[in-house]
């Protein structure tokens, strides 16, 4: 079996520190690399005055990591700039928040070239190279320029936007052309894949060959749907661990007789937190009899704090949760407990298991792993209800959840009411269908699916 070289913006090192395990990407890839062995390459998270390309190697828990430091300017322009002020909002349909700056693009190009220069000597002849996410779209092309003929795969963890949105990016053509350096490109859903194909056909004159690969000029790429999963077995075990039990008891003691609803999200505008709070407020307004009998625990660790929109959303949610609590709280009841911190996974599993309802209501999400984790953590005899946005990639697989339009406060309020009143038989029926999918299509399945496609590419490309 070929060795695996994973390349992504950040590299997660297995750690007891809860904050190290927060990103969905990190959780998934650590599991995958532990299973197969290999190297994970990326940015160390540290800055240096002058870029040297020095590689920091570390071994731990079956995973070898190799990282580089970047300059302050790189981080401003590439990470906080093009990746998180331009591509992230654009790929999540938030053109109103998308910033177009030439300097950002310069930094994006420079850092992708720096990644290519430093990772190049670490790639062995037969290695499969798997590049992740919107930070590194041009990396494949930079590696080809440096003589890499290996099989190269790329996986996009975010949505792929419709062409009408994508064309607002001045360099949209260059960005998509760069994807043709890869042999296999993966998306979470048919929707994202269709948008990509449509762009290639409409804007680049692409055609399909007899194998279903998309062809532009002399380049041929297999674009596939590979929905990411979680390490389901590990999560199911975590949910019955002593630490999870202790967490559940703590939660139950602090809220006797009340139903817990939970939300767990990075503090990000794409996750629909504002709309969720408004939906819950509407529910409290519409159902005076339910007040005092339910509460929402929203766990939202801050992310990307250097980007203004993230500071704004934080202030906005502080104010909104304060307003709702101010309006509805009583001396012995607060409707929203809003917590800005990360939890170790067994505690998180305990929180999920204690919750009668999960609110997973992003406005747009590539997949969303929280929805799957919640299902994996439930008690099979008395499972809770998943309320899931139909705009999350996960909705394509998890059709037995209560699906909602997260923009509609009324719909959210009705879904909360439906979930809280749902009889146990229906909860169990829905949960059984959901857990079957979460078990079948777990992170190992996802990894095998993608790497199987990549390994099957016949002739590695030159030049
Ligand atoms: P994210 O946007 O980070 O990932 P998501 O899929 O929900 O979103 O994953 C978040 C992960 O962080 C989950 O594993 C969750 O348990 C963890 N997490 C969140 N809050 C936490 C907390 N307070 N404490 C501990 N852990 C916490 C991106 C895309 C998604 C896609 C993933 C994987 O945006 O659409 O599903 O990559 O491809």
Image (spheres, rainbow, N blue to C red):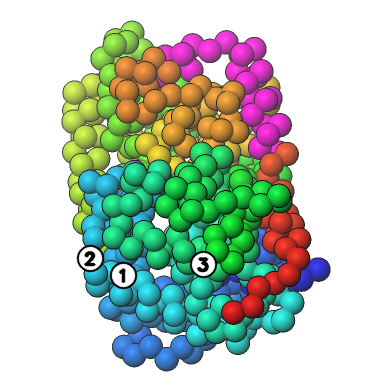
**Does 255 appear in magenta?**
no
Instruction: Give x and y (percent) for residue 52.
Output: 42, 91
Q: How would you rate the neighbour count of disc 1 (Cα within 10 Å): few for under 14, some for 14-19, many for 20 or more?
A: some
Q: Locate residue 108: give its quadrant.
A: bottom left
| Residue 339 visible here | no
- Kindly report which numbered mark, 2 or 3, lies closer to the viewer in this rendering: 2
Q: Nearer the viewer, residue 42 or 47?
A: 42
Instruction: Give x and y (percent) for residue 199.
Output: 45, 49
Q: What residue is rendered at 42% in x and 19% in y? A: 416
In this figure, which residue is indicated by the disc labeled 1? Answer: 105
Q: Which residues are magenta?
A: 416-439
- Kindly report which numbered mark, 1 or 3, lies closer to the viewer in this rendering: 1
In this figure, which residue is indicated by the disc labeled 3? Answer: 8
Horizontal side of 26 relative to 2 (left or right) equals: left
Q: Nearer the viewer, residue 6 or 208?
A: 208
Count how many numbered circles sit on residues in the image.
3
The quarter of the rendered structure image containing the C terminus is bottom right
Q: Earlier in the sequence, mark 1 or mark 3?
A: 3
**Magenta stretch: dominant secondary structure:** helix
Callout 1: SS: helix
Q: Is residue 23 above or below residue 116?
A: above
Q: Is the C-beta separation of discs 2 and 3 under 8 Å?
A: no
> Disc 2 versus disc 3: distance between alpha carbons?
23 Å
In this figure, which residue is indicated by the disc labeled 2? Answer: 101
Instruction: Give x and y (percent) for residue 455.
Output: 74, 63
Callout 2: SS: loop
Horizontal side of 425 relative to 329 (left or right) equals: right
Q: What residue is rendered at 72% in x and 63% in y? A: 457
Instruction: Give x and y (percent) for residue 374.
Output: 56, 36
Q: Is residue 262 above or below residue 9?
A: above
Q: Is the C-beta separation of discs 1 and 2 under 8 Å?
A: yes
């Amino acid at each position: 079996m070929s060795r695996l070289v994973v390349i992504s913006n950040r590299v997660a090192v297995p750690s007891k520190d809860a904050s190290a395990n927060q990103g969905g990407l990190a959780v998934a890839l650590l599991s995958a690399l532990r299973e197969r062995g290999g190297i994970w390459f990326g940015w160390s998270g540290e800055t240096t005055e002058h870029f040297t390309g020095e590689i920091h190697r570390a071994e731990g828990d079956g995973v070898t990591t190799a990282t580089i430091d970047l300059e302050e300017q790189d981080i401003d322009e590439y990470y906080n700039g093009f990746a998180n002020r331009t591509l992230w909002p654009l790929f999540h349909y938030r053109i109103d928040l998308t910033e177009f700056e030439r300097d950002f693009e310069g930094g994006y190009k420079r850092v992708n070239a720096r990644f290519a220069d430093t990772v190049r000597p670490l790639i062995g002849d037969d290695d499969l190279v798997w590049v992740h996410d919107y930070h590194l779209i041009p990396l494949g092309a930079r590696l080809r320029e440096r003589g890499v003929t290996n099989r190269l795969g790329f996986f996009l963890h975010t949505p792929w936007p419709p062409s009408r949105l994508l064309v607002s990016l001045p360099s949209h053509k260059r960005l998509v052309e760069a994807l043709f350096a890869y042999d296999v490109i993966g998306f979470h859903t048919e929707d994202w894949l269709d948008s990509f194909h449509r762009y290639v056909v409409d804007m680049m004159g692409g055609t399909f060959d007899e194998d279903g690969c998309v062809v532009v000029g002399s380049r041929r790429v297999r674009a596939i749907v590979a929905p990411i999963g979680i390490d389901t077995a590990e999560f199911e075990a975590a949910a019955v661990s002593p630490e999870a039990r202790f967490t559940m008891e703590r939660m139950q003691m602090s809220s006797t007789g009340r139903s817990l609803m939970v939300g767990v999200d990075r503090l990000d505008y794409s996750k629909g937190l504002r709309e969720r709070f408004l939906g819950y407020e509407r529910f409290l307004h519409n159902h005076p009899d339910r007040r005092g009998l339910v509460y929402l625990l929203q766990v939202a660790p801050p992310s990307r704090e250097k980007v203004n929109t993230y500071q704004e959303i934080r202030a906005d949610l502080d104010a909104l949760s304060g307003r709702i609590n101010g309006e509805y709280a009583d001396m012995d009841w607060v409707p929203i407990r809003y917590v800005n911190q990360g939890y170790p996974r067994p505690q998180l599993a305990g929180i999920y298991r204690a919750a009668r309802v999960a609110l997973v209501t992003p406005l747009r999400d590539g997949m969303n792993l929280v929805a799957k984790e919640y299902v994996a953590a439930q008690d099979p005899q008395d499972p809770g209800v998943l309320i899931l946005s139909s705009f999350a990639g996960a909705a394509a697989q998890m059709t037995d959840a209560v699906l909602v339009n997260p923009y509609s406060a009324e719909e959210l309020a009705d879904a909360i009411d439906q979930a809280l009143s749902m009889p146990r038989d229906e909860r169990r029926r829905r949960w059984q269908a959901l857990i079957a999918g979460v078990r079948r299509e777990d992170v190992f399945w996802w990894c095998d699916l993608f790497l199987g496609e990549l390994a099957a590419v016949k002739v590695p490309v030159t030049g």
